[in-house]
Amino acid sequence: MNPLHSRTSLSMRCASLALGLVAASVFTTALASPSIAAPAQTSSSAQTADARMEREIAGLLRHNEGAERVGKDRVRLEPGVELTVLPSTRAAAGMNDCRGGYACVWQHGLYAGYRLDFYNYGSYELANYALPSGGSWQDQVSSFFNNQTGGAWMVAKDWVSEGGGSQWEWIFGGPGAYAEAQVSANDRADLIQLYP
């Protein structure tokens, strides 16, 4: 056997092995890199959130006669009353989500969950507005922000039956720019009133 031939062969085998190890290392690093895997998860999460929001919007339109979609996440239930579905991919902005000139009530404390926005003065019976699942807003309010201007009031009332009689009882509310992150009369509101 030629000694020169065996050295060249050994040298080529070592170079080949080294190239194989480098390629395996690059491949392994690429697979473990979070920047490669993240876009697929983010896209999937956004698609799931969009699909959930579309189902909830469809539920609102089905359960609220005459309702119409007025935004990606908003449905007008009647003139001056809109319901907002929060996309799960976005953190709630809390009371800052309530537009100027509106009085807003949330389904949960700390301005979370579905939100009803009222714009026009008047009385609104919450039993007339359905959630995406079909249940009503009656006895569902846990927080509110009256973002009306000019000192306009928003109050919530509960229908109370006592001593053989029934009447509306004021349970929470206040003038413009007043908010409560957790109302003391949690899940008791039957009526929302807006007035100057």
Image (cartoon, rainbow, N blue to C red):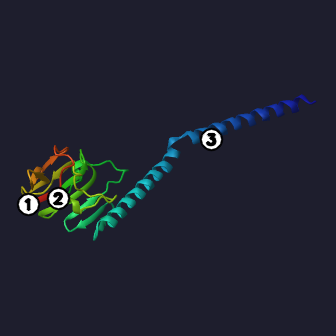
Q: 10 Å neighbourhood of mark 2: few (<14), some, or many (≥20)?
A: many
Which residue is painted at 15% across and 57% down in the image? 192
| Badge 3 amino acid | Phe
Q: CA distance from mark 3 to mark 2?
A: 56 Å
Residue 25 got which mark?
A: none
The residue identified by callout 3 is 27
| Badge 2 amino acid | Tyr
* Residue 193 image point, x, y percent: 12, 59
**Residue 128 position (above or below residue 49):** below
Q: CA distance from mark 3 to mark 1?
A: 67 Å
| Badge 1 amino acid | Tyr
Q: 10 Å neighbourhood of mark 1: few (<14), some, or many (≥20)?
A: some
Which residue is painted at 32% across and 47% down in the image? 91
Residue 102 got which mark?
A: 2
**Residue 90 position (above or below residue 131):** above
Say whether residue 164 is left or right of residue 68: left
Foreground: disc 3 or disc 2 = 2
The residue identified by callout 1 is 195
